[in-house]
Amino acid sequence: DTKPTNVETNSILVEKDTGKRYWFDGSVWTIDFLPNEISNMEFWYDVSDATTVTKDASSYVTQLSDKSTNGRDLTSASTAYPLWVDSVQNNLPVIKFDGINDYLSNANVDVNQPSTFFFVYKASVDVVDSETLFDTVTASPSTDRIVHQTDFDVGTYDIFAGAIAVSGNILDTTNFNQFSMVVNGASSTLSRQGVEIISAGTNVGSGTLNGITIGSAFSGGQRGAPWLAEFIAYNKLLTAEETALVELYLNEKWGL
């Protein structure tokens, strides 16, 4: 809604009805909110939080800890780990997958439909024909898969949960973007920076996320080389206000 005018720099205003706090730095309003204030959070991976990133001496990430209460930390069974890179986006660190053999996973993730995913990442240049950001962990029927990938051949962003849905030819390999992805059978959608790129009402199938692999498809194929900043999932449909809060949080934090 309309914000008050003539507010002093570094003021905090409290909304009477909700108790939400808004901070004004002289030019930008920031809402006082964290994603775990919304119920049904499944996992929350935040590369900018140094307390959740375990690195070896060469800055390769051996574990990315879950900031939700579910303890679904990401690790790798191999010794091929993604690289932690400092001061990449908005002076914050991200992790970079190499598109060859590194990934992170957790077999104990179980996200049913309807579900809502938020992620901030930059797609790589063409490493393989399709670059998988996330998938399940083992070869399994389509009913055990929810996938987000890019397709370099046609320049699209894709969702798969037994059936595939694709965006227009709008693949961006230059910039970090914030995505909101709703997986709800025939009422699924994908938005980039708050704008739908896969329209609501698209059928992506009835799959669930039975375990998670980031940086690779479940079979080890379609290994991606994305730059990942943050990844959040909820096991429910969010309200319009909840979605706006998470998007605002991510966009402000990562300078998008």
Image: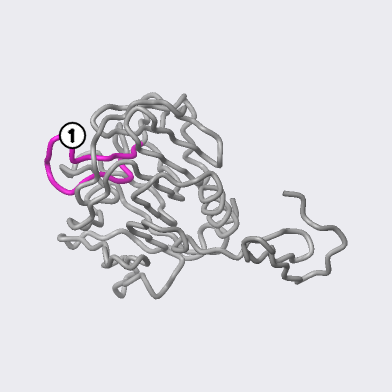
State the extent of the magenta-drawn residues as a range.
Answer: 132-149
Q: Is residue 61 visible?
A: no
Q: Nearer the viewer, residue 61 or 35?
A: 35
Which residue is pictured at 51% across the width and 59% down the height? 88
The colour mode here is: one colour
Instruction: Tell me residue 3's x, y (percent).
Output: 77, 55
In the rendered structure, does residue 145 fall within the stretch colored magenta?
Answer: yes
Q: Quadrant of residue 41?
A: bottom left
Amino acid on which the number 1 mark rests in the picture: Ser
Instruction: Tell me residue 229's x, y (percent).
Output: 44, 56
Horizontal relation, residue 86 to residue 216: left or right: right
Instruction: Tell me residue 1's x, y (percent).
Output: 72, 49
Q: Within 10 Å of the Cα at label 1, are there few (<14), some (14-19), or many (20+) other Cα atoms? A: some
Q: Residue furthest right?
A: 6
With respect to residue 203, does 40 lie above or below?
below
Which residue is pictured at 13% across the width and 35% down the height? 141
Horizontal relation, residue 101 to residue 242: left or right: left
In the rendered structure, does residue 45 fall within the stretch colored magenta?
Answer: no
Instruction: Tell me residue 52's x, y (percent).
Output: 36, 71
Which residue is pictured at 51% across the width and 42% down the height? 174
With respect to residue 116, does 12 lie above or below?
below
Horizontal relation, residue 13 to residue 247: left or right: right
Q: Is residue 104 visible?
A: yes
Local SS, label 1:
helix
With respect to residue 53, does 99 lie above or below?
above
The residue under label 1 is 142
Q: Quadrant of residue 127?
A: top left
Horizontal relation, residue 35 to residue 3: left or right: left
